[in-house]
Amino acid sequence: FRDKLTIAINSALLLELLHAQNIIANNINDEQLYINKNLDIQIVDLSLASKVSTIHKKIPDTHLDSQWLPTMSPEFSGRMNRAVDKQADLYSLGATLFKVFTGRYPFEYKDDMEMVHAHIAKVPHLAHHFNNEIPEQISTILSKLLKKNPEKRYKTAQGLAEDFKRCLSVLNTDNSIDLFPIGQR
């Protein structure tokens, strides 16, 4: 479990580095991330990435390839009339980390339109619903990342990393993770 928290921290810190350079990944998923034996993370595919200044209100439907659907943010669907920004990356990272912690994506449908609809309108089960060994605090963090409204998600990947770091620190000290207010940093 500590390894999964380390992966979450390192993924958030890597995303923060991209965002600091005004780069939006436009849909992080587990196939894009390379994790080495030291649990360092690299992004191996930034083919959908764009500079913040070049982002348009809607991504054309041609980008909605089935491989991107399990981690697609609601705004990336082009059906929300919202700009794709850093919060969209946080959503897709949340869906990716959901799989890291649970072994599955928050939504799993065979039908593409059903998957798009789920990201736009359905609230996913909490992560500990799929794996009762996941502390409620981790479920709460993942749930915040997967909010439909971008303003209710984390403001920065750095803030996300700080919450995961706190979880790891408490786990290393107390061998459990108690609830604490998230998104404070």
Image (cartoon, rainbow, N blue to C red):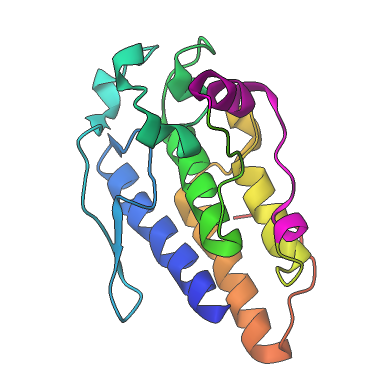
Residue at 29% from the left image edge and 27% from the top image edge:
52
Residue at 27% from the left image edge and 37% from the top image edge:
23
* Residue range highlighted in magenta: 111-130
Q: Is residue 134 left or right of residue 98?
A: right
Check if residue 125 falls in the magenta segment.
Answer: yes
Q: Can you say whether 65 is above or below 134 in the image?
A: above
Residue 31 position in % (x across, y down): 32, 51
Indicate the quadrant where residue 130 lies. bottom right
Residue 171 position in % (x across, y down): 66, 82
Indicate the quadrant where residue 83 lies. top left
Which quarter of the rendered picture does the C terminus lie within? Answer: bottom right
Residue 84 position in % (x across, y down): 41, 24
Which quarter of the rendered picture does the N terminus lie within? Answer: bottom right
Q: Can you say whether 99 is above or below 68 in the image?
A: below
In front of the other: 149 or 45:
45
Can see residue 183? no
Main SS class of the magenta portion in the image:
helix
Can see residue 59? yes
Q: Is residue 162 left or right of residue 121?
A: left
